[in-house]
């Protein structure tokens, strides 16, 4: 009678996983998720701006929401918790800032009179 180890599929990241590996997974998932978010937000904002509404609150869907989503992803991956290292947490914050900075204008080239 052999006993097979049970695998807990509820945790996406192993607790003994290397910090560099966690950062690489965060970068991949963060970039992919942010681009999908921006494409969806572009469709919604394009419909809203077609009516001629002013775009004075551009920072909310373009910067704040993606940054919060990335930080939530990092927290679910184990960053910012008691067992994480300072360098890992600083790396995630730097990656979050870079992803948000480089993807702000991803699908938003020009809408009628609103050009970035």
Image: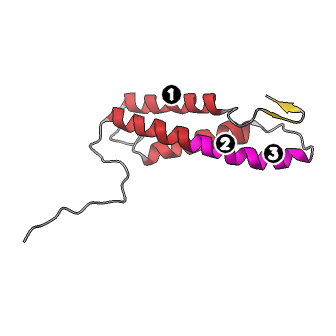
The answer to whether 80 appears left or right of 32 in the picture is left
Q: Main secondary structure of the magenta part?
A: helix
Q: Which type of secondary structure does the marked residue at label 1 adopt? A: helix
Q: Please name the residue that numbered disc 1 is placed on.
A: 94
Cα distance between the residues tagged 1 and 3: 30 Å
Q: Nearer the viewer, residue 5 or 85?
A: 5
- Where does residue 25 sit, x and y in percent of width and height? 42, 40
Quarter location, residue 38 = top right
Camera-near label (2 vs 1) is 2
For the point 67% across and 34% down, the residue is: 106
Mark 1: few/some/many CA within 10 Å (<14, 14-19, 20+): few
Quarter location, residue 83 = top left
- Where does residue 105 sit, x and y in percent of width and height? 70, 32
Q: Which residues are magenta?
A: 33-51
Q: Which type of secondary structure does the marked residue at label 2 adopt? A: helix
Q: Which mark is residue 36?
A: none
Q: Please name the residue that numbered disc 3 is placed on.
A: 46
Position of the N terminus by quadrant: bottom left
Position of the C terminus by quadrant: top right
For the point 70% across and 38% down, the residue is: 62
Q: Earlier in the sequence, mark 1 or mark 3?
A: 3
> In the image as oriented, which residue stretches furthest toward the left?
1
Answer whether labels 3 and 2 touch (C-beta < 8 Å). Answer: no
- Where does residue 12 sit, x and y in percent of width and height? 38, 52
Q: Please name the residue that numbered disc 2 is placed on.
A: 38
For the point 61% across and 28% down, the residue is: 102
For the point 35% across and 48% down, the residue is: 13
The answer to whether 1 appears left or right of 83 in the picture is left
Cα distance between the residues tagged 2 and 1: 20 Å
The answer to whether 114 appears left or right of 82 in the picture is right
Quarter location, residue 68 = top right
């Amino acid at each position: 009678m052999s006993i097979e180890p049970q695998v807990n599929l509820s945790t996406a990241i192993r607790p003994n996983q290397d910090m560099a590996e966690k950062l690489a997974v965060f970068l991949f998932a963060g970039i992919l998720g942010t681009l999908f978010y921006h494409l969806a937000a572009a469709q919604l904002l394009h419909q809203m701006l077609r009516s001629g509404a002013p775009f004075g609150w551009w920072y909310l869907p373009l910067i704040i929401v993606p940054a919060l989503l990335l930080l939530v992803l990092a927290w679910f991956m184990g960053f910012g918790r008691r067992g994480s290292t300072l360098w890992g947490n600083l790396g995630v914050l730097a990656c979050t800032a870079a992803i948000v900075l480089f993807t702000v204008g991803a699908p938003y080239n020009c809408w009628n009179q609103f050009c970035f």
